[in-house]
Image (cartoon, rainbow, N blue to C red):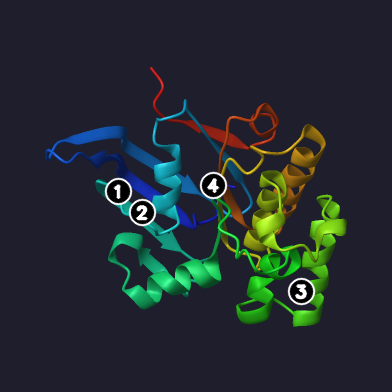
C-alpha cells in the first residue's frame, strides 16, 4: 500500500487557536501523516484535542497554525498545498475531489433526503450517467435504513437520519479523499456497521479515507490509527 503515492500529505501540521489576547493554544503539535488510496485511517483522541479542527483543515475550510497540507489527485490533475490554493482551485478540490462529512451534516432543510444526498448528481461531478448515479444514491439510502424517508424534507429528519444522508452525499461523487468527523456518532450498532462497510467499499474502489471517531466499531475496522492529544 505504501508504494502507492499518497493523495494527502501533512507536514508538521500544528492545530490550535489564537485567543483574543493574542496568545496561541496548540492542540496538535507537528503532525506528520500520509493518506494513501485504498486505506481507512482512524483519528483517535479525547474530546477537545483538535480532531474536528484538523478535519476542517483537511476540508479546506480553515488553515492550520503552521505546517503544510498537500493534496495530489491520483491522476495529478490537482496538486498543491491547500493553504496556497487560489479560490478556484480550492473550490474545485472541495467540489470534485473531496467527500466531507461534518458533525453538523449541513443539509438543505427544504430539500428532501434524496435530493440532499444526490446534490452532486444534480449539479456536480459524477461517474457514469446521472440516472445510474441517482439509482446508486437511492440504493445506498435504502441500505442505511432510509428507504421510507427519501421524500422527507431534511428539516424533519432526526440527527441520525441527517447523518446518514450526509454520508451518502459525501460518497456520491466517488471522491479520491474522504474525511469524516464522527460519522457513526448518532447511529445504532447495526446501522454503524453498514456505514463502515460502505466506507470500506469506497476504500477498496480507491478512495483514501480518514475518520475521526470515538466509536469502538470504527476502531476495530480501520487499517491504521493516528492518536492526537495523548499523554
Q: CA distance from mark 1 to mark 3?
A: 35 Å
The residue at which mark 4 appears reads as: 2
Q: Which mark is residue 64?
A: 1
Q: Is mark 1 in CB contact (under 8 Å) with mark 2?
A: yes
Q: Residues within 10 Å of mark 4 (few under 14, many from 20)?
A: few
Quick check: 171 above or below 199?
Answer: below
Q: Residues within 10 Å of mark 1 (few under 14, many from 20)?
A: many
Q: Residues within 10 Å of mark 2 (few under 14, many from 20)?
A: many
Element assignment for label 1: loop
Q: CA distance from mark 3 to mark 4?
A: 31 Å
Q: CA distance from mark 1 to mark 2?
A: 9 Å
Q: Is mark 4 in CB contact (under 8 Å) with mark 1?
A: no
Horizontal side of residue 104 vs 119, given as left or right: left
Residue 52 lies, in percent from the top left, at: 45, 42
Residue 123, quarter of the rendered image: bottom right
Q: Residues within 10 Å of mark 3 (few under 14, many from 20)?
A: some
Labels 1 and 3: the sequence-earlier one: 1
Residue 81 lies, in percent from the top left, at: 33, 61
Horizontal side of residue 141 vs 31, given as left or right: right
Labels 1 and 2: the sequence-earlier one: 1
The mark closer to the camera, 1 or 2, is 1
Q: Which mark is residue 69?
A: 2
Horizontal side of residue 191 vs 45, given as left or right: right
Residue 58 lies, in percent from the top left, at: 43, 53
The mark closer to the camera, 4 or 1, is 1
Amino acid at each position: 500500500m505504501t508504494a502507492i503515492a499518497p493523495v494527502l500529505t501533512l507536514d508538521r501540521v500544528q492545530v490550535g487557536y489564537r485567543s483574543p489576547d493574542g496568545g496561541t493554544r496548540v492542540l496538535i503539535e507537528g503532525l506528520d501523516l500520509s493518506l494513501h488510496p485504498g486505506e481507512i485511517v482512524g483519528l483517535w483522541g479525547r474530546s477537545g484535542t483538535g480532531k474536528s479542527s484538523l478535519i476542517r483543515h483537511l476540508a479546506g475550510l480553515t488553515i492550520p497554525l503552521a505546517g503544510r497540507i498537500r493534496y495530489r489527485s491520483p491522476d495529478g490533475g490537482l496538486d498543491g498545498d491547500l493553504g496556497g490554493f487560489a479560490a478556484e482551485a480550492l473550490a474545485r478540490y472541495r467540489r470534485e475531489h473531496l467527500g466531507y462529512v461534518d458533525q453538523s451534516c449541513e443539509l438543505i432543510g427544504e430539500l428532501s433526503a434524496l435530493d440532499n444526498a444526490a446534490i452532486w448528481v444534480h449539479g456536480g461531478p459524477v461517474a457514469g450517467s446521472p440516472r445510474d448515479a441517482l439509482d446508486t444514491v437511492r440504493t445506498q439510502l435504502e441500505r442505511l435504513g432510509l428507504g421510507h424517508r427519501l421524500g422527507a424534507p431534511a428539516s424533519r429528519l432526526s440527527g441520525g437520519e441527517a447523518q446518514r444522508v450526509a454520508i451518502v452525499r459525501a460518497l456520491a461523487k466517488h471522491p479520491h479523499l474522504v474525511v469524516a468527523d464522527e460519522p457513526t456518532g448518532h447511529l445504532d450498532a447495526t446501522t454503524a456497521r453498514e456505514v463502515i462497510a460502505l466506507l470500506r467499499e469506497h476504500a477498496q474502489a480507491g478512495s483514501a479515507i480518514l475518520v475521526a471517531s470515538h466509536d469502538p466499531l470504527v476502531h476495530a475496522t480501520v487499517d491504521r490509527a493516528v492518536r492526537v492529544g495523548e499523554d
